[in-house]
Image (cartoon, rainbow, N blue to C red):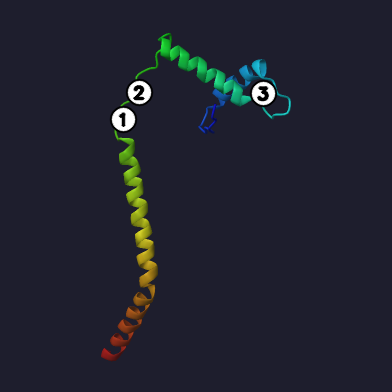
Amino acid sequence: MASTSLTFRCPDEMLEAIDNLGKERYPAANTKHGCDRSKTLIDIMRAGIEALSDGSVVLPAPAEVRQHPSEVRQNLSDSLLEARITEIVERKTERLQTALAELSELVGESVA
């Protein structure tokens, strides 16, 4: 069986409940939380998937989504691209802007 790492945010109360269950099922004295969280979470997920699959547990309907995830990614991508382009253009035209400012000062002094 292949294994992949999974990272997610977890409320403190839920993490405490996971650790309490883990201490009963998979105690491990050499971890700071006193249990094998991976094995505990795998058991919890298997039980949850089984309960959802056989219909004994039903998840509430998800909240209404205002934006499609791909739109969010596209907007982020577009804004990051625009910021990068602006940065490059400013860096590449810096000498030209300086030269124009100096020329403007020279022209302004000769007219006065």
Q: Is residue 2 left or right of residue 100?
A: right
Packing grade of label 2 (10 A; few <14, some 14-19, many >=20) is few
Label 3, secondary structure: give it: loop
Which x, y percent locates residue 108? 29, 85
Disc 1 to disc 3, how far (Cα)? 37 Å
List the residue tagged with mark 2. 62
Residue at 56% from the left image edge and 18% from the top image edge: 43
Q: Nearer the viewer, residue 106 or 12?
A: 12
Which quadrant would the N terminus be assigned to in this image? top right
Disc number for residue 35:
3
Q: Amino acid type of disc 1?
A: Val
Packing grade of label 1 (10 A; few <14, some 14-19, many >=20) is few
Q: Nearer the viewer, mark 2 or mark 3?
A: 3
Q: Amino acid type of disc 3?
A: Cys
Q: Are marks 2 and 1 in contact (CB under 8 Å)?
A: yes
Disc number for residue 65:
1
Q: Amino acid type of disc 2?
A: Pro
Which x, y percent locates residue 91? 40, 68
Dividing the picture into quadrants, the one containing residue 44 is top right
Q: Nearer the viewer, mark 1 or mark 3?
A: 3
